[in-house]
Image: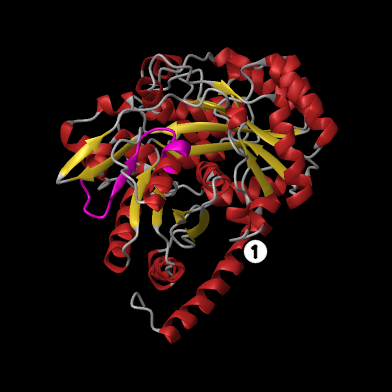
Amino acid sequence: MRIAFVYPFFESLGIEYLSACLKTNGHSTKLFLDPMLFDGIVASNRPLDKLINFKKILIAEILEWKPDLICFSVVSDCYVWACETANRLRQESSAKIVFGGPHPTALPERVIDNDFVDFVIVGEGEYALLDLATYLERKEDYFNIMNVWCKHNGTVVKNQLRPLVTNLDTLAFPDKDLYSDYYKQFVKEIYLIMGSRGCPHACSYCYNDYMKRLYQGQNFLRRRSVDNIIEELISAKVKYNYKRVDFRDDLFIFDKEWLRELCTKFKKHINVPFNINAHPDYIDASVIEILEDAGCRGMVLGVQTISEELRIKKLNRRCSNENIVKTINLASKTKIVLFVDIIIGLPGQDKEELIKIAQFFNRHKVDFIKLFWLRYYPKTKMMDYLDAKTKEEIERGDCVAYFHRFGNSFSKERGKLANFILLSQALPSQVLDFFIDKKIYTYLLTTTFSTFYFIIRSFSKRVLGRKFAYRNFGIMAFIKFYSYFMSKWIRSTWRYRRVKLPIM
């Protein structure tokens, strides 16, 4: 069976695992990507996005390939995009359409209600999608596949969940060819990998919060064996010659003995820079030493806010400022580039709290501050702070902007304070205090200048001799990315106009 994966933005490990499972069992897969050049992570320009829009090209490419099954992996941020694309494909193609991912898992009853959606996969999808594809190809009854919701005789069939995959080593390695064949730099620049699934925590704003409740009673946090991870990385290094490795585990360091074994073998067999996600409560001097010795050059630290009360009561995230400061101090003495995540717009987070964040990071310097506007995701506990009308809008996707925009919590005052937080890294403490005393921050721009901040900070790190190891593409890689897809847009627009496909 010919199975198309349709996705916006960048690389998805989830899709790669799905594709690997399908290919291993004889199915054919292909990726169709909307790079969203001017409505994406780097640039947002409505006139340019309207002019240089890939959606028509995307749909024309899918129609030309003639898939039997079209798959959308959907987060809430791109739910509206997925619905618009799927609806247009339904008008032009007889292929079945399946939605899976975080948003359909949280709201299967709402997603399956769309006329253009034939199936919804709830929860982990490898074997559910494999069963669906196999039964469709054989023209067999597909109405009782676990994890799959479908339509039958005017009603919705809601099948039960199958157990989680307990032994992750049994899964086929993610299908990196899916992305490499589309744009080779995806894999050549950075190799994305996960050594685990799940998280020991249940932060109220995170999708894992709902997933842990969905799979209540099961072992949600699972680890791959070290040898299985190293085997994947060795074979991929030979095939793709990647420059860096990015471990996308929600929490990479919670098991010190596993970490020690992995880092020892990683240094011996792989020996390239790598990045991780971390939590301050799991960091000590020995962990930092293990990571730096193995080649860790980028660590993302979840801080979110410096109010311990807000962090515990509203975010369900137990972490002390003392441990945050300890981790910052330990990382500052190493080659590890430290990023901290901060969320703006939390319930109960006032102007004074944002000013305190600026003061905190003025006194405790990190390499990069990553600011995120609070986003509300369906079925997470954070949704409890919203009224019924706003919940309904978020579940429909009506008030959900893409994740690179302002989220659900933007205000002009917060925008100015967000820029003040970024500036706090560069200002002497006396100057920062003067800005606060005289309220000079009120004259800053309302739109955050995060992109300029990262460019300036990364340049300064290079000048000072501390190599910048950002987990996504570097500046030159983004230039190549835009050049490639601009060229593709010109070629494809001309070609599809000549052949006069109906979508054009």
Q: Which quarter of the rendered picture does the C terminus lie within?
A: bottom left
Compared to 160, does 120 lie above or below? below
Q: Where residue 202 sits in the image (x, y, percent)? A: 43, 20
Magenta segment boundaries in residue numbering: 113-129
Q: Is residue 461 part of the magenta span, yes or no? A: no
Q: Residue at x 41, y 71 (%)?
A: 60
Q: Where residue 394 sits in the image (x, y, percent)? A: 26, 40
Q: Is residue 117 part of the magenta span, yes or no? A: yes
Q: In this view, does 438 lie to the left or right of 267?
A: left
Which residue of the protein is positioned furthest toward the right in this rendering? Answer: 268
Q: Where residue 389 sits in the image (x, y, percent)? A: 16, 37
Kindly tell me whether residue 467 is visible in this rendering: no
Front in this rendered view, residue 102 or 426: 102
Residue 364: image quadrant is top right
Kindly tell me whether residue 39 is visible in this rendering: yes
Q: In this view, does 68 lie to the left or right of 222?
A: left
Going by the numbered disc 1, the residue's amino acid type is Lys
Q: Where residue 385 sits in the image (x, y, percent)? A: 26, 26
Compared to 35, does 73 lie above or below? above
**Residue labelled with disc 1:** 480
